[in-house]
Amino acid sequence: MRTVDLIQRKRDGEELAPEEIDYLLDGYTNGEVPDYQMSAFLMAVYFSGMSDREVSRFTDCMLRSGESVDLSSVSGIKVDKHSTGGVGDKTSLIVAPLAASAGVLVPMMSGRALGHTGGTLDKLESIPGFHTSLSPDDVRRLLGEVGMCFLGQSDRLAPADGKLYALRDVTATVESIPLISSSIMSKKLAEGLDALVLDVKVGSGAFMKKQVDARRLAQMMVGIGRRMDKRVQALITDMSQPLGYAVGNALEVMEASQTLQNAGPSDLTKLSIELAARMIHLSKKTASLDDARRLAEEKLVDGSGYRKFKQVVAAQGGNPQALDKFELLPNATGMREVTSPRGGYVTLIDAEDIGVASNMIGAGRDRKEDTIDPAVGIILEVKVGEKVDAGSVLCRLYYTREDRVEEAADLVEDAFRISAQKPEERELILEVVG
């Protein structure tokens, strides 16, 4: 078997056999297949795609390249939720405690910010003392004691994916739907999950800009899970404007805390309830999805989800008082208002521009080695469809360094569109797959 022959066959759109995919990925992981050949293979996949069987084998091979978390000793159905990334998307901080307070076991494995999208781990680590580096024993202990945990992606889980992702990042193959699907699912399945709820974002603030592409991604990930005997559902949700009002790490923790106290934005609350309900239903805690929705709403309204969030923060070394007393969280030193140049209706808030502007003032990272400022970010004062007057505040930028504030403010101002006509209301949850 020769690597160059496999590259050529994939370039020409042929389907590779399972043992050929094993040969490629095992060889790349142990150093026998060089970067330049794997780069060529990734580009061939980018243009020719992969069959369902190829994607499943590719995922399984990455999964087998490292360790898996053995959760068999923890009785109960383990369910996680994954988002493909967006701006202001702090649902994991809300959904996991809601589901756990309803009796679901939730090992929530999350990632870090990269590009214009935020990372759950960075948000959580803005809580003083909170740590997300957990061993398999820690995960089992926390699931037994608290019913949930937030953990970072270990280098020992699906290490082939880590090598491949770094290569995709520098070979312009990140957007390949088969490669995205296998990357996400190999890491998620390494957790020892029984079920998974996917939130596939689409719109300006998402990696998938078109709904047809988001649907293909959702279908492929659901298919991978089912072929590996896991229960998987996906929601395709709108990311054309930021979710909620807060963008930035500590700011999003504050908004998540408010939402768990039933005082959050309507869009964030609605999506969080729906995601939690699907986790509850997949865990077989309720007979129907409607029952699961009622249970999720009950856990929000009675404060059970909020108490569960404080419990897991304490269990992972954080200060739960910071969820009540926001002055204990990192706070910015400066504030800059962006006002509306005219009166009318807000017809667009470009989520990607808001995310990029937030990064400019330190809330995100463009490279993995960049340092995040947890205190900074942007708070929207309006959402799409609302009426504004000339000179009214559209949003506020919170910063600790002044060097790029004006540049960020200009970009934020351009992100807003104000028109005379009120826009049609856009659905938040666009489709369900699985």
Image: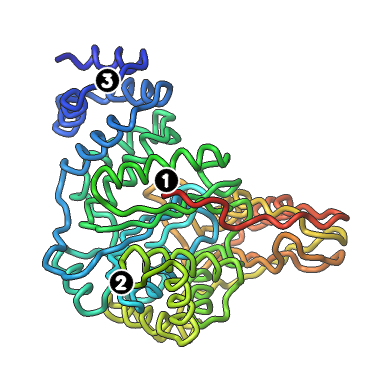
Question: Within 10 angstroms of label 2, few (less than 14), some, or many (20 or more) residues?
Answer: many
The answer to which quarter of the image holds residue 87 is: bottom right
Q: Please name the amino acid that badge 2 sits on.
A: Val
Provide the residue designation for mark 3: 37
Image coordinates for residue 254, horizontal then vertical, percent: 51, 75
**Any mark on residue 367, and which?**
1
Image coordinates for residue 387, horizontal then vertical, percent: 81, 65
Apparent side of residue 412 relative to residue 70 in the rendered image (left or right): right
Provide the residue designation for mark 2: 104
Q: Please name the amino acid that badge 3 sits on.
A: Gln
Q: From the viewer's side, name the closer residue of 369 and 27.
A: 27
Instruction: Examine the rendering and report whether any part of residue 23 can be seen.
Output: yes
- Considering only vertical position in the picture, is 247 above or below 326? above
Q: From the viewer's side, name the closer residue of 14 and 69.
A: 14
- Considering only vertical position in the picture, is 12 above or below 107? above
The answer to which quarter of the image holds residue 43 is: top left
The residue under the point 22% across, 45% down is 158
